[in-house]
Image (cartoon, rainbow, N blue to C red):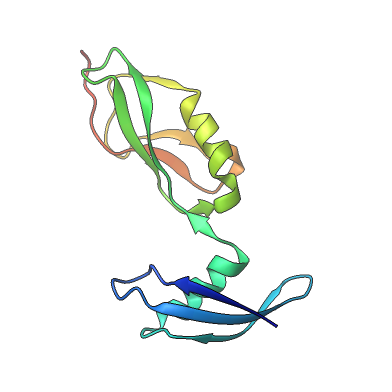
Amino acid sequence: MKRKELTCIVCPNGCPLEIDFEETPSIQITQIEGHTCDKGPTWAEQELTRPMRTIASNIQVENGDFPLVSVRTDAPIPKNSIFQVMKEIQSITVKAPVSIGQALIENPAGTDCNIIATRHVNLA
């Protein structure tokens, strides 16, 4: 049996969690202690079995009143896909105008998300 300590990031409490688990072909969680809300165990299980993250970055804009547009994923992606998604983000330039919420890249690196704009960029 193994034990891992994590700090839960789901709510502002930041509970120190202690997770007991077994590593067979897959991770089997046997016990989770230290959470003060019901969201902690669900987050801890996901973090150990399939960690997910969101990305925030920038994409270059051609002919815009700003040279960059801020972007983010519209859903969490698997942690091991971050570098592939970032490579796609860094490889493109979009043309102005850009609207908030506009999907600039669909399903980057085969993930189930879109890269969306988080600000308006007008024509220069």
Identified at 49% across, 46% down, the residue is 113
Estimate the x, y position of residue 43 in percent, counting from the top left.
48, 72
**Please, is residue 124 above or below residue 73 in the view?**
above
Which residue is at the front of the view, 59 or 111? Answer: 59
Estimate the x, y position of residue 115 in percent, counting from the top left.
43, 39
**Please, is residue 95 above or below residue 20 in the view?**
above
Which residue is at the front of the view, 2 or 94? Answer: 2
Left of 41 or right of it: where is 101? Answer: left
| Quadrant, the N terminus | bottom right
Which residue is at the front of the view, 104 or 6? Answer: 6
Left of 73 or right of it: where is 70? Answer: left
**Please, is residue 94 above or below residue 108 in the view?**
above
Identified at 54% across, 66% down, the residue is 47
Which residue is at the front of the view, 7 or 71? Answer: 7
**Please, is residue 42 above or below residue 104 in the view?**
below
Left of 105 or right of it: where is 22? Answer: right
| Quadrant, the C terminus | top left
Identified at 38% across, 36% down, the residue is 57
Estimate the x, y position of residue 86 in percent, counting from the top left.
50, 35
Q: Residue furthest right?
A: 25
